[in-house]
Image (tube, grey):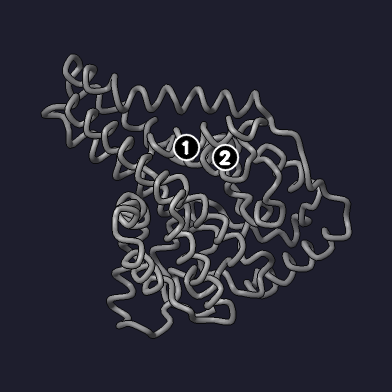
Amino acid sequence: MDPEVSAKAETKAFAAARTQRTPRHSAIDSRANLALLALVTLAMLLQLLAWPFLLRHWGAHALWLAVPLVVLAPTHWGLIHEAIHGQLLPRRRLNESAGRVLAITFLLPFDAVRFGHLMHHRFTREPYDRPDVHDGSSHRVRARVHYYARLLGGLYAAELVLPVLAFLPVGHTRKLVARAIDSEGPVGMNVQRLFVGFAGDPARRSRIRRDWLLSLALHVGAFYLYGEWWPTLAMTMHLRGVWLSIADNLPHYDVALDEPERARNFRAPRIWHAVLMNHHLHQLHHRHPTLPWTALPTLAREIAVPSATRSDAAYFRTALRQFRRFGKVR
């Protein structure tokens, strides 16, 4: 099917869906979230505490345990994502505390990630949020290298070192943030102002410093436990970061500014739905960010596009396609 025809069909389907009665609020599925919390907690205990002892006793045979740890990376992030939207646990303080602990074990600054994600919802595909587009402000080769480095774990690496800004003098931090988030585009000045304001907020800076120090202490202790097997932990963390970086870019990759919510939905095998926490239904999430992840499939069925015009691409195939095309101005 011609891509333009498919896009138009999808746009019409979602426009028609606006006239249907779709839920904007749904109860949090605490049982599902607690089950995934237990699974991810077990995985983190394995990665940070138990695995080094298993490697000493089982040797290379224990390396296979890297597979479930890497596979669960999107689930770990998905739980943090639900906490960001207040949909992980019913009680607000418990929801935030759980999200913060999950972020610490993933070496992510919860406050910064939460702010950045909510800004992403508010200003999707604005100039600062289009890593796949070459705007001509830098050499094309340099921009391409930066894009592929971002996909191959660069986004996660940037988030690892982002808390360093909270240790710098406020004025210096604001200047660095203003330089990184330029004022291009019709809402550029507003975007820059909000980011600079966040960077200078004393309460947030304090929490970011505290959480980062806890993350460092936790992971330095883990590397000590691994001893000579420390490259195993480093490689596993890198692969989890690669998955996170690729998955973050995927729903908005090569998306035109006139597409619904500037995001896309994808098809994914049912066995992956819980692992991805329905992240493949990202366009629906942008349309209904207050819905918990467990409510998205029902909504998708209610406003489903007829099979003859359905244009959702395959999730994992499109993830690989991100490496083939770069720089198309949409």
Quadrant that contains the C terminus: bottom right
Front-most of residues 234 and 266:
234
The tag on residue 62 is: none
> Quick one: SS at disc 1?
helix
Labels 2 and 1 touching (C-beta < 8 A): yes
Within 10 Å of disc 1 (Cα), the crowding (few <14, some 14-19, many 20+) is many
Asked where in the image residue 292 lies, by quadrant, the reply is top right
Asked where in the image residue 42 lies, by quadrant, the reply is top left
Name above or below for residue 146 compared with residue 106. below
Separation of marks 2 and 1 at Cα, in angstroms: 8 Å
Q: Is residue 254 left or right of residue 89?
A: left
Looking at the image, the residue that sits furthest to the bottom is 136
Q: Is residue 114 left or right of residue 266?
A: left
Say which amino acid is labelled 2.
Ala
**Picture coordinates of residue 13, whole percent (x, y):** 79, 62
**Picture coordinates of residue 99, whole percent (x, y):** 51, 36
The tag on residue 100 is: 1
Tell me the residue at 55%/69% (across/down): 125
Number of numbered discs on residues: 2
> Quick one: SS at disc 2?
helix
Residue 319 in view here: yes
Tell me the residue at 65%/56% (across/down): 286
Say which amino acid is labelled 1.
Arg
Name above or below for residue 2 compared with residue 285. below
Q: Earlier in the sequence, mark 2 or mark 1?
A: 2
Asked where in the image residue 200 lies, by quadrant, the reply is bottom left
Residue under label 2, please give it: 83
Tell me the residue at 69%/53% (across/down): 284
Tell me the residue at 42%/44% (across/down): 207
